[in-house]
Image: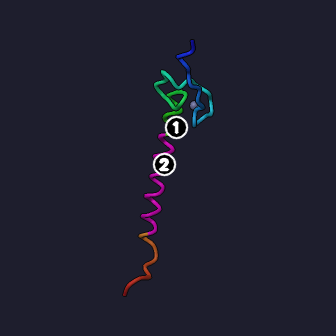
């Protein structure tokens, strides 16, 4: 009987294969990769906010 089927997934950061079930860092392979993904997301969010700010503080050619 094969009622317990383990799912194998690939880490989205490093591409390493790992067992999904019972993995505290899923879908990542380790705590390190989980942190990397978070930093990436955080950096992107920060960049978008900065761009918006720069756009609003540029040339004023509207209204007068
Ligand atoms: Zn990984």
Extreme-left residue of the structure: 64
Structural distance between the alpha carbons of marks 2 and 1: 11 Å
Residue 6 higher or lower than 16, as above or below: above
- Judge the density around disc 1: few (<14), some (14-19), many (≥20) Cα neighbours within 10 Å: some
Looking at the rendered structure, the secondary structure element under dot 1 is helix
Outermost residue, top side:
1
The residue located at (53%, 26%) in the rendering is 20
Label placed on residue 56: none
Which tag, 2 or 1, sits closer to the chain's start?
A: 1
Q: Which residue is label 1 attached to?
A: 36
Q: Is mark 1 within 8 Å of ligand 1?
A: yes
Where on the picture, by quarter, is residue 61? Answer: bottom left
**Residue occupying image coordinates x 59% and y 26%:** 8
* Quarter of the image with the C terminus in it: bottom left
Residue that label 2 marks: 43
What SS does tag 2 mark? Answer: helix
Question: Is 40 situated left or right of 17 in this image?
Answer: left
**Residue drawn 48% across the image and 45% down it:** 41
Residue drawn at x 61%, y 34% as measured from the top left: 14
* Residue 44 belongs to magenta span: yes
Magenta stretch bounds: 38-55
Q: Nearer the viewer, residue 52 or 3?
A: 3
What sort of colour scheme is used for the picture? rainbow
Beta carbon at label 2 within 8 Å of ligand 1: no
């Amino acid at each position: 009987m094969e009622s317990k089927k383990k799912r194998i997934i690939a880490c989205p950061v490093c591409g390493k294969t790992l067992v999904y079930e019972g993995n505290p860092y899923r879908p990542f392979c380790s705590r390190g990769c989980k942190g990397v993904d978070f930093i990436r997301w955080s950096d992107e969010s920060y960049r978008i906010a900065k761009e918006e700010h720069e756009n609003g503080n540029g040339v004023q050619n509207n209204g007068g």
